[in-house]
Image (cartoon, rainbow, N blue to C red):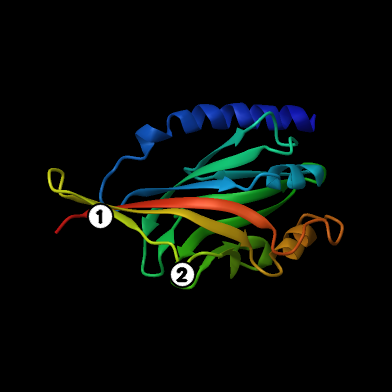
């Protein structure tokens, strides 16, 4: 039954992500994060009975044969908007779902803060606390590529290749909330990479 659920979710996600280019219109104030999990992360979670997906205007898809394959990866396409702290995934959530127990952990409205080198999110299962969930290991060295389009009067700022690991203690929190055995997920697990593109008005 679990494999059927995963197969259906994957098929729907692939269809939705194929249309994302149309939804991600390049207008000032709009943008997109493309987040790809590290090789082996999806199989690590799947082995524990946990699947990853996104909701609220975001889509996900699987690269590879299936979630349990050692080389498979999950790709997230998440709409974002800029705010004072950095970039916020307004209305988009990352979900860790335990298919065996129906327990889940929600990372609500994640905020990317390159200055601090973290991705934080509101976690309803932790009393709506705002927690650092991911650490950006190369935040101090990632430089944006800026492209100015005078014809459309638009500036594109692209950050590529940011590397993400689970922030200290997050693996244990995920395991606890999902009802997994202690130590099921390694602390500081290499989560993946992310590319962020921002569109602003060209002055």
Residue 88 point in image, percent of width and height = 44, 59
- Which quadrant would residue 39 be assigned to in this image? top right
Residue 37 point in image, percent of width and height = 61, 47
What is the quadrant of the N terminus in the image?
top right
Q: What element carries label 1?
A: strand
- Residue annotated with mark 2: 140
The total number of labels drawn is: 2
Mark 1 or 2, which is nearer the eye? Answer: 2
**Residue that protrudes farthest toward the front in the picture:** 141
Question: Can residue 13 be seen in this snapshot?
Answer: yes
- Front position in the image: 155 or 79: 155
Residue 165 point in image, percent of width and height = 62, 60
- Residue annotated with mark 1: 200
Residue 56, above or below 64: below
Q: How far apart are marks 1 and 2 (CA)?
A: 23 Å
What is the quadrant of the C terminus in the image?
bottom left
For label 1, the crowd category at 10 Å Cα-Cα, with few meaning under 14, some 14 to 19 and many 20 or more, is some
Using the image, tell me which numbered label, if any, was put on residue 69. Answer: none
Identify which residue is drawn at 29% across, 53% down: 29
- Which quadrant would residue 42 be assigned to in this image? top right
Question: Can residue 98 be seen in this snapshot?
Answer: no
Identify which residue is drawn at 51% across, 59% down: 110
Residue 172 point in image, percent of width and height = 76, 64
């Amino acid at each position: 039954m679990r494999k059927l659920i995963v197969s259906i979710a994957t098929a729907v996600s692939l269809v939705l992500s194929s249309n994302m280019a149309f939804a991600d219109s390049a207008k000032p104030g709009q943008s997109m994060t493309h987040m790809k999990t590290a090789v082996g992360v999806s199989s690590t979670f799947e082995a524990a009975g946990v699947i990853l997906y996104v909701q609220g205007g975001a889509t996900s898809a699987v690269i590879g044969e299936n979630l349990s394959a050692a080389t498979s990866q999950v790709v997230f396409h998440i709409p974002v908007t800029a705010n004072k702290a950095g970039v916020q995934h307004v209305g988009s959530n990352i979900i860790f779902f335990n298919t065996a127990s129906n327990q889940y952990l929600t990372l609500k409205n994640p905020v990317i803060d390159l200055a601090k080198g973290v991705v934080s999110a509101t976690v309803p299962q932790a009393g709506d606390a705002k927690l650092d969930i991911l650490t950006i290991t190369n935040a101090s060295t990632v430089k944006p590529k800026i492209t100015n389009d005078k014809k459309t009067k638009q500036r594109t700022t692209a950050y590529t290749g940011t590397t993400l690991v689970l922030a200290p203690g997050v693996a244990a929190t995920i395991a606890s909330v999902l009802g997994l055995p202690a130590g099921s997920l390694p602390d500081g697990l290499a989560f993946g990479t992310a590319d962020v593109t921002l569109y602003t008005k060209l002055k």
